[in-house]
Structure formats: structure tokens, C-alpha cells
Amino acid sequence: MHVCVASSLESENTRPFLILLCVLALVSCSRSYSVIPGGAPPNGAANLPAGTGYKQLFAFRGTPLGSGPTGMLYSKGLLYGTTTAGGTKTFGTLFVRGISGKVRVLYSFQGGSDGANPEGMLTELNGVFYGTSQYGGADGDGTVFSVTPAGKERVIYAFKGGNDGATPVLDGLVAVNGKLYGTTNAGGSSSCTHQAIVGCGVVFSLTTSGHESVLYRFKGKPDGACPSGSLIESGGALYGTTNFGGSYDNGSAFKITTDGSEGVVYSFKGFPDGDMPFGGLTLLGGTFYGTTTLGGAYQGAGTVFSLTPSGSESVLHSFTGAPDGALPYAALIGVGSTLYGTTELGGSALPACLGHGIVGCGTIFSITTSGTLTQLYRFKGRKDGAYPLAGLVASPKNLLYGTTLAGGINQNGTIFEIAQ
């Protein structure tokens, strides 16, 4: 397994929780999270109002529709997304939710050369959707694939590991001038290792016909290690984040040109600015915004931060667990002048969901650019969903859509909507 992990607790409490950088639904990974049957907290369990405008749209059933949904894309009134597991061969699916509300499988991964365990949001380019699978492909190191709205899947590129890169994690691709750009969490330079994994990850470019080029191989210190999440384009350059590495080994924000010139914008310190910026960056009004899964000022439950292109970082909010949430993995989404996001854990102060000693099944929140956080919903775990790992997607109708990895009537995850 190639995924970089946070493998130990640290005395300075910047990593108080053992976090595996893989998805709950993959049986080879062990998050040790559970949903307690009937464990929904009563009303008033937390101090923040939550719940207005929330609606569950669909609960996954494992086979054949999939389980463990992650990111989604809104296109022409439809929601396209991935599940990390389930399907006919248990290796995940590509699905679409139609205007009528019916969910159907576009493609069910077979686990071989076609890919296995797709993650993250799809990217649309010229009417075709592109995404990544964490595993599978000719060498088992993950793939970039395309799928048509009719469900025809094709592997565009299979990663080879070694110098080429391996294991794209929640890697939403970005399209710039007809070319795709993304990252792999491992592989790259054999001279860089992180927690016994060879290679600290790469940034790559890829044509839709399958010509791949490695633009940059991370070195660990001081540039970063184990990138995940999506890149974002601004001013002709690409910006992203790494989970580890940087000057303090707590992750970094980086800038890279399309010809491969890389520079560190900011290195995270852990306390109080944050640790492990898993989800990438969001650009709003000329400033970048993002989350760190760990670190911050309170129990290491994560942060929301702002970052200027010149490298000035500010913490907008440090999560406390209950009632505001804990462990934000996903990228933020900007709608107007407001940012929206999710925390995978926290919310309720009662243990309806458990994960590494953290209570709460996750939250949906909004936050202003000045740092005022409003909780929009606290998940209860059993029927409504649990662990909203992925980010949100907006529609023109002032609605946000998202997924939970678990929960729902069959405990295989859900699709939900919530009013802005």
C-alpha cells in the first residue's frame, strides 16, 4: 500500500489522532470508526443550531450501486460521482443521479487494468468526465480514466510507480488549456522516503490521448511530501498542498508552473496554524482558503485558514470537536463571498459515531472570510449519514450537494443536499 500515513502521536499534541490517509470503505485501511445503532443524539446536544434545509437524497446499498461515495460534480442538472467500494466486483463505481432522483451506475470497476477504488471529484472536459483511481491499472499503482455520460470507461494512463508516481488520493484533476493536471501521493524520487514509503509524490500533466509527463518530484523537506486533493489554477500557475514535508514536516502549500518550476508558498507548523492540509486550496477574491485536517489551537482537531499568494497565512477558525466539528479533510467551496465545507468527525458531543477517540459523525459548515463560522448541519450517524469526508458542490438553485462515507439506511453512505 502506497498511501502516506500519520503513524504516531507526537508529544507536542500536533498529531493527537492516528489518521490513515485512505478511505473508510477500503477494507485494507483501518480507520477504526463505527456507527452505533440507534445512536442519534437528542435535540439540543450541542450549542450551535443545525439542521435547517438538510435533505437526504439517496442511501447507497453496496452491491451493485456502490458504497463509500466521495466527491461529486454537478453538470447540467445531474450529479456525477465516485464510490470507493461496492459495485459488482467491490472495487467501486462511477454513478449519476438523474433529474428524477434515480441513481444509476455508469461503470463498475473490475479491479484490474481498468482501475480500482476511484476517489474524488470528476472533471469535465469537452463533454467527457475524467478522474483517478487510487489502485488498479497495469501495475496496480492507480489510473487516470475517462467516462462518457453514457458510461463508456477508458483508462487514459496507468501509473507505473517508481519515478513515475503512484496512488492518486482524492485527486480531482484540473483542466488547463485542454490538458489535465494532478498529483500522486507516492512515487517520484527514490531518494525521498516518508514513513517507509518510497517516493514523496509527484505533480503530473496528461493529455487526453494519454501522454503523461512528471512535472515535479517532491523531496520531503523543505518542499513537501504526499500531495493529495485538487490543484487549482491561478495566474498561469498551479497551486496545491502536501500532507507532510515542508520545513516542519506538517505539510506545505506550493506553487508550480506548467513547465515544472516549483516553489513553497507556506510551510505549516502544526500549532497553532494547522497540520496536514489534505484537501488543496480554494481561490476567492485573490486569496487562497483551505483546511488542515489536524493541528490548530484546540486538541489538534484542524483549522480553516487563509493564505495570500505571497505566503502570509492566517487561521480563521480552529475546530474543537464538539459542537463545531473535527478533522476537515475536504477542500472548501466558495459561493459568493462565503465558504462552505465539511468536517469528517465532531459535531455532536454524544458518541453516536466513534473514531480514534473523537465523538460525532461530522458536520457541514459555512465560514466568512473574516472567520465567522456557522454550523449548517450535524450528522447523527444512523439514517442521515456519517463521516462527510468529501467536499461540497454547488448548483445554480442555491443548493449544495455532498456525500457521506457511511450511514444511511444500509450504512454504505449517502447523497445529501442542503440550502446555502
Image: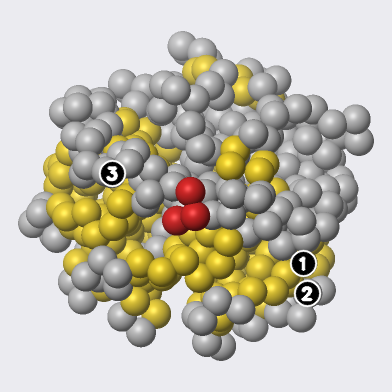
Among the 4 quarters of the image, the one containing residue 125: bottom left
Tell me the residue that label 3 is attached to.
137
Q: Label 3 amino acid? A: Gly
Q: Amino acid at mark 2?
A: Gly
Residue 231 in the image, given as x and y percentages of width and height: 51, 66
Q: Residue furthest top?
A: 37
The residue drawn where x is 76% and y is 49% is 250
Numbered disc 3: secondary structure: loop
First of labels 3, 2 by sequence position: 3
Task: Name the image quarter holding residue 398.
Answer: bottom left
Q: Earlier in the sequence, mark 3 or mark 1?
A: 3
Disc on the earlier residue, 1 or 2: 1
Q: Residue at x 25, y 27 (%)?
A: 90
Image side of residue 390 versus residue 257, left or right: left
Q: Which residue is mark 2?
A: 311
For disc 1, the neighbor class at 10 Å (few under 14, some 14 to 19, many from 20) is many
Q: Is residue 20 left or right of residue 55?
A: right
Using the image as rendered, state which of residue 370 and residue 118 is in the foreground.
118
**Closer-to-camera residue (265/381):** 265
- Please state the horizontal and vertical placement of residue 86, each as a whole percent of the image: 26, 29
Element at badge 1? Answer: strand
Kindly report the distance in space between the C-alpha atoms of the residues bearing marks 3 and 2: 38 Å
**Residue indicated by mark 1:** 266
177 versus 278 height, above or below? below
Q: Residues within 10 Å of mark 2 (few under 14, many from 20)?
A: some
